[in-house]
Amino acid sequence: MEKKPFVTKEQIEEIVKTYPTPFHIYDEKGIRENARKLKQAFAWNKGFKEYFAVKATPNPFLLKILKEEGCGADCSSLTELMLSDTVGFSGQEIMFSSNVTPEADFRLARELNAIINFDDLTHIDYFKGIAPFAETMCCRYNPGGDFTLNNAIMDTPRDAKYGMTKEQMKIAFAKLKEYGVKHFGIHAFLASNTTDNGYYPKLASILFRLAVELKEELDVHIAFINLSGGVGIAYRPEQSDNDIFVIGEGVRQAYEEILVPAGMDDVAIFTELGRFMLAPYGHLVTKAIHEKHIWKEYIGVDACAANLMRPAMYKAYHHITVLGKEDLPCDQVYDVTGGLCENNDKFAVDRALPKIDIGDYLVIHDAGAHGFAMGYNYNGKLRSAELLLKEDGSLQQIRRAETPEDYFATLDLAAFKTTEETGEADEKDATMPKDRIILKLIAKQ
Ligand SMILES: *Cc1c(COP(=O)(O)O)cnc(C)c1O
């Protein structure tokens, strides 16, 4: 599939007058259209709900758009819960699918009346000491072994830290029933970034069969099956995109085959997609600021792995478009790099691109999920701004860029003495006020 940016060179030249590169920019129109498609693909299921995986793109402006499209929020930490609460997701519009969960996180999740998804059997008694059980609760399943699709191994659940074995699921449900839980959910995430329309249907069959077994053995009401995340996108132009309608239809068939005959036709389907919801609708926009000709040809840009970690961390492919040069031949081969003192800070390696000139703007595609969110401050690099291209064509800054003040803000400088001052006359308190140090630090910019 051809990869076209949702912004033009002219638009970016206008935007950079106010917001210098690098920045992440999101496309509201694309986000809404895609969310509506997902909803339509699962419209056959009365209780269907997508709980957007907040970790993928934790920005309240984007969460609000998804909420308006009928989505809930999937959280796994205290701050994600706080953010979702602030956006206005209420009670059962929040799934709390965490692991290695601290007490405070469980407590807030319960206070908000979120649906809690237990990652482990031991968490149930841990939770018992923290808060009362709710009427509806969920457990996460790990079937072990390999997850295969059409005889190909897609992932290896036996090596994954998440979820419970089948025997543990049974013990967990029995325990929860004893503690007063009335409605149960089953959750599993068995393969990430899948590009086969068969992933969700296969996962659904596994979970539907387990649901029938649990219901029959333990006489419990299964209220929902949460297929979690994992539906991928085509990062490479030669890949084809998932067809969400084929996926929805595949899940429907498994539902008809397995759940309906067991008298379980009231089970709601939930999803917790992150990447599928937002990745294609976010670009990282960066400017070529250096070129270098040594053993290879390099283009240095003003963004780095601190703005988008996936290429450095997973050797992930992200397509690059040189704005204004969309139609030129890709007759150069470059490594496109950021400025971290880390040789894996490369957005592209041996990539065929049109000839790049200093000052050209590059769009790094599919950065809308697990992009900004995975950002970090290594080498003292600052996180960029996030901008929203609205449906009416206007632009809104939805997160400003970090400043040096932000970077230094968590240092406990109140008690810090510079070497200069430590050596000064002893009767004088040589402690430098925090504000003065920060001013001094930023004056050097
Ligand atoms: C990360 C995550 C998701 C979202 O995964 P995607 O690959 O972005 O779809 C959903 N649920 C849980 C529990 C997760 O950890």
Image (tube, grey):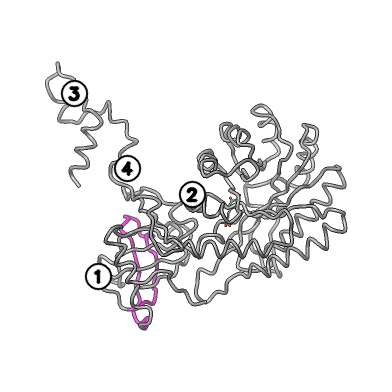
Q: Earlier in the sequence, mark 4 or mark 1?
A: 1
Task: Give, as a three-letter code, the residue at label 3.
Answer: Ala
Residue identifier under label 1: 358
At numbered mark 3, what does the secondary structure look like: helix, strand or loop? loop
Measured in 3D between alpha carbons, the distance from the residue under mark 2 to the one under mark 4, in whole angstroms, is 19 Å
Measured in 3D between alpha carbons, the distance from the residue under mark 2 to the one under mark 1, in whole angstroms, is 33 Å
Measured in 3D between alpha carbons, the distance from the residue under mark 1 to the one under mark 3, in whole angstroms, is 48 Å
Residue identifier under label 3: 430
**Which callout, 2 or 1, points to the residue nearer the camera?**
2
426 relative position to 328: left or right: left
Give the vertical position of 62 relative to 286 (above or below).
above
The reply to whether callout 1 and callout 3 are in contact (CB within 8 Å) is no
Q: Nearer the viewer, residue 385 or 76?
A: 385
Question: Where on the picture, by quarter, is residue 38?
Answer: bottom right
**Which callout, 2 or 3, points to the residue nearer the camera?**
2
Task: Give, as a three-letter code, the residue at label 1.
Answer: Ile
The magenta segment is 329-354
Q: Earlier in the sequence, mark 2 or mark 3?
A: 2
Task: Give, as a three-letter code, the residue at label 2.
Answer: Pro
Measured in 3D between alpha carbons, the distance from the residue under mark 4 to the one under mark 3, in whole angstroms, is 24 Å
**Residue 347 painted magenta:** yes
- Whether residue 306 is visible to the viewer of this picture, yes or no, is no
Q: Nearer the viewer, residue 61 or 222?
A: 61
**Which callout, 1 or 3, points to the residue nearer the camera?**
1
Q: Earlier in the sequence, mark 2 or mark 1?
A: 2
Residue identifier under label 4: 407
- Label 1 CA crowd tier, 10 Å (few <14, some 14–19, many 20+): few
Residue identifier under label 2: 58
Q: What residue appears at the point 83 percent right and 63 percent down from the top-left corner?
A: 257
